[in-house]
Amino acid sequence: MSDEKKPSEQPSPLRANASQDGKRALAGYLPSGSARPARILCYEEDARSRKRLRDAASGLKITLDSTGSTEEFSKAIGDGDYDVALISIDRHEAEAVRLATELTSAEQPICVLLTVRKPTVDHGVLAMRCGAVDLIAKPFDLDELRERLASAAERAQSMRQQARRIARLKRICRRLNKQRQQVNNQVDVLCGDLVNAYQQLAEQVDSASVDQLAMSIESELDVESLLRKTLEHMLTKTGPTNAAVYLPGNSGDFSLGAYVNYDLPKDTADTLLDHLADIVPSRFRDERSIVALDSEAKLVEHLDDNASWLSGSSVIATGCHSHDGDCLAVLVVFRDRNDPFSEAVSAELRTLRDAFSRQLAKVVRVHNRATPKAEWLGFDIGDEPEEDEGMTDWGWAA
């Protein structure tokens, strides 16, 4: 094949673009500055072709090494830092294609060119399949070869820059992921601290609430005043609500001790609350927990046929007990179910009930010790002897 084209020759499918890119890149690869020259490794068995390659590389910012052995080529690629690989497929096509495919598939960015005598369309398809960027016909045209080498060197430089950017982005992503994990760990720790702080604060608030009520009633030895202050304090925690406190009598029955009317009709409120005295205390006198009845099903479960008296209401009920387990009172609060009691209200009522129970037990103990047994209130507190005869019912409503 001479330097002049024969009419029957098929042009390389990769040749036109490479030639245009080479003309633009050629000036950039003339000697200038101190940048590292592009490194090219050639696998070429023909000595004259290797000399032609060295002549084309002279004057360009290119370092060119060549070998006629595939083993030496593979070793040199593994040991050296090459930008471009120039591989001849004239004699050992299968081996050359294998080398080209391995290089284009490797992580190391390297630009692969194939050379061949009498190139055909099949050669062009083969070059594209193995990832080569150019297919160069032999014998080489010096000017064209210089353009092709310059274009390949520029492409290799672009590939290396892109690989460096990708590597840098990967490092940044790894660093960001590590920092994200650290932040997540810090957030977990912070959330744990906040939960602990909230629990401590809630305990302090509960304690403050108990202390506030206890301080306001600790000197109260009058039942009426004690009930009034307790209900007043309760309303600050529950908001507007109907409430009733039922106290036990000598016969074991309960009567209305004090109440708050929020939205009950005035002419029927006393009747309703007195009727509840026959229903609610008997069901909740032994109840130590705060029982919330926020549905018709729960009302029926606890009150059976009498649930209709509180139909449509959200109800909370509990017993108030002494240290020895005696029921001192039954507390019930209720209002329209469209304005239900929250769990926080239940927690507030628990602390209020405990403080009220302690003070009520003190009031009863003091009263029983200071009065004749025949006038004792309807409670048995502490170590006082039990005596049913002569005890009288008592109660009041505020």
Image (cartoon, grey):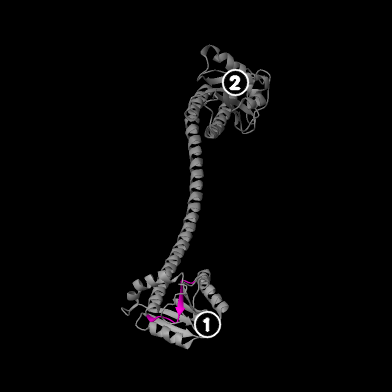
Q: Nearer the viewer, residue 328 or 113?
A: 113
Span of residues in magenta: 132-142
**Where is 10 relative to 350, above or below?**
below
Residue 136 inside the magenta-drawn segment: yes
Q: Quadrant of residue 25?
A: bottom left
Q: Which residue is mark 1?
A: 75
Q: Could you say which disc has been placed on residue 256 in the image?
A: none
Please tell me how crowded label 2 is: few (under 14), some (14-19), or many (20+) other residues with Cα within 10 Å.
Answer: some
* Structural distance between the alpha carbons of marks 1 and 2: 94 Å
Q: Residue at x 58, y 26 (%)?
A: 315
**Helix, strand, or loop for circle 2?**
helix
Please tell me how crowded label 1 is: few (under 14), some (14-19), or many (20+) other residues with Cα within 10 Å.
Answer: few
Residue 31 inside the magenta-drawn segment: no
Q: Amino acid at mark 1?
A: Lys
Q: Nearer the viewer, residue 208 or 151?
A: 151
**Where is 269 relative to 59, above or below?**
above
- Let me know if residue 346 appears in the view: yes
Q: Which residue is mark 2?
A: 310
**Helix, strand, or loop for circle 1?**
helix
Whole-percent x and y of residue 161?
Answer: 41, 69
Q: Quadrant of residue 29?
A: bottom left
Q: Quadrant of residue 365?
A: top right
- Let me know if residue 81 appears in the view: no
| Extreme-front residue of the structure | 7
Question: In the shown orientation, is residue 146 left or right of residue 280?
Answer: left
Whole-percent x and y of residue 249?
Answer: 63, 20
Q: Nearer the viewer, mark 1 or mark 2?
A: 1
Q: Residue at x 55, y 13 (%)?
A: 268
Q: Amino acid at mark 2?
A: Leu
Whole-percent x and y of residue 334?
Answer: 55, 24
Mark 1 and mark 2 lie on one chain; the one further toward the N terminus is: 1
Whole-percent x and y of residue 33?
Answer: 31, 78
